[in-house]
Amino acid sequence: MTNKPFIIKEATRKRCHIFEIDEESGAKFVQVNSEHFAYLREVKAIDFSIYFRIGLTMIEFMKPAEHSKELLEQISRAIQKEYAGLEICIRKIDRNRLLAIIDSVRRQKIDVLLDKEPTLDRKVLEIFGNLSNASQLVVRGGINKDTAKVVEASAAHLVDNLFDSQSAMATLSRMVIHDPTLYDHSASVAMFAALISTQHLEQNVSKKEAAIIAQCGLYHDVGKTCVPSHILNKPGKFTPDEFNVMKEHAIFGEEELLKVIENGAPIHESVVRVAGEHHERWNGKGYPRGHCGALHAENLNGIHLYTRIVSIADVYSALLMKRVYKEAFEPQDALLIMEKNAKDDYDPIIFPKFLNAVVASLNALQKSNEKGRILFRDEDGLLKESKK
Ligand SMILES: [Fe+2]
Ligand SMILES: [Fe+2]
C-alpha cells in the first residue's frame, strides 16, 4: 500500500516560507523522528524552526515565535498520517538545541518518575540519560570521529559506575514501563548488555571489554537509518518485501561502521560484527547470514560472544516498549516470552544468567515495593510467578 502524498494547502502557502533545495543545501537539514519530536511538545518555547521536507521542497512549518500546541498537534498528526516522502526536519546547526531540550525534558521526567517510585536507583537513571544523549547523536548526526568519542566516553562512564548495582536491571525495566517517553532503545540495550556482561558472566569480563559491549549495544541498530520511516513505524505486519528492506539494516550498519572506522573513528572492530550479527539466532534461523551457535576456531560461522549478549538485551528491551505494532510487556511477561524461545534463540549459558539476574533484581525491588509479581523457579526448574 502506498502512502498518500502531502498536498500543500493554500493556507499553508500563505503562512509558511516555502523554498526549494538542492542536494548541497539539503545536506544542511536533518530529520527528526516522532519520538524526539514528542519532546518538543513538552516545552514552553523552542528557539529554532521546524520544517517539512517533501523531496526537494522545504516548508518552514513552524518558527520559534509561533510555538503553539495547535501547530505541534498539526505536525504530529502529519507524522501519524505518514504521507509519502514527508519528513520532519530541523537545520543541522540546531541539532544541539534539540538535544538540549531532550536532555532537560528527560531530567524532569526522571525526577517525576523517582517521586512516583522512590525505590528506583537515581544513578542508573542518570547514566541512562547520559547514554541516551550519546545514542541520539549517533541517530541524528550519523557517526563520525567526534560522536564515536562521546559514545566511547559514555560507555566507559556506564561501566565505571554500574559495576556493582544490583538494582540496575530492575530500575531500567521499570523505567521503560512507567514512562515510555524516556525510552531509548539503543541506550537501554547498551545498559542491559553491559549489565549482563559485568555482573553475570563467569568468564571474567574486564571493564574494558564491558565498555566495548556497551558500545556494541549503542551502535547495534545504526543501520536502521536506511529503513524508510513508514516501514520502521508500520503499525501492522510487514509484507515480505517490507521485511526484506527491514532486514537490510544489519548489513547496512556493518558498512556504515566500517566506513567511519576507516576514517579514524575510535570504534572497536567487534562493534561492526555485532551490528551485522545481532539478528542471528542460536539455532541458525536468524538473519542475514544464518550464523549458528558460538563462534570459535572450529565454528567460524558461529555467533560472536558480544552478539550473544547484545541480542538478548535487544529482544528484552524491544519487548518492554510499546510500539505502534505492539503493546508494552511487563518485565515479568517479557521474561516468560523469552524463556519460551530460549532454546532456539539464545546462548544456553548466557541466557539463564541474564534471566536469573533480572528476576533477582525485579524481585528485590518488588519486595521493597510491597506489591507486584514475584518470579521463581519451581522444583522442575520451570519459571513461574506468584502474586503478592
Ligand atoms: Fe536490529
Ligand atoms: Fe534493536
Image (spheres, helix red, strand yellow):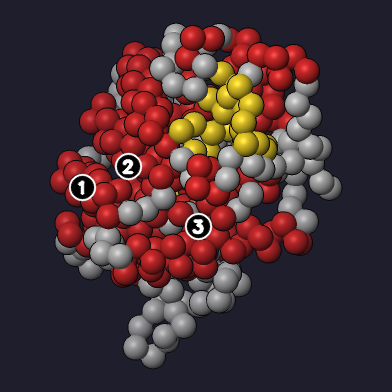
Under 8 Å from ligand 2: the CB of mark 1?
no
| Gap between marks 3 and 1 measured at Cα | 22 Å
* N-term-proximal mark, 3 vs 1: 1
Residue 378 image position (x, y, % from top left): 47, 50
Disc number for residue 134: 2
Residue sitting at the far bottom = 298
Q: Quadrant of residue 103?
A: top left
Q: Residue at x 41, y 77 (%)?
A: 294
Q: Disc 3 residue type?
A: Gly
Q: Residue furthest right?
A: 1
Callout 1: 10 Å neighbours few (<14), some, many (20+)?
some
In this rendering, does residue 50 appear at all? yes
> Residue tagged by mark 1?
153
**What amino acid type is highlighted by mark number 2?**
Ala
Kindly check if marks 2 and 1 are in contact, taking CB atoms under 8 A apart as contact: yes
Residue at x-position 78% and y-position 56%: 239
Q: Residues within 10 Å of mark 2 (few under 14, many from 20)?
A: many
Rendered residue at 34%/13% (across/down): 115
Q: Position of residue 75 (x, y in %)?
A: 63, 22
Callout 3 secondary element: helix
Q: CA distance from mark 3 to mark 2?
A: 16 Å
Label 3 C-beta lies within 8 Å of the nearest ligand 1 atom: yes
Question: Which residue type does callout 1 highlight?
Answer: Ala
- Rendering quarter of residue 364: top left
Q: Residue at x 78, y 18 (%)?
A: 10
Q: Which residue in the protein does label 3 denote? A: 223
Residue in front for this viewpoint, 356 or 312: 312
* Mark 2 beta carbon near ligand 2 (under 8 Å): no
Q: Residues within 10 Å of mark 3 (few under 14, many from 20)?
A: many
Q: Earlier in the sequence, mark 3 or mark 2?
A: 2
Task: From this view, report whether residue 215 is shown above or below residue 330.
Answer: below
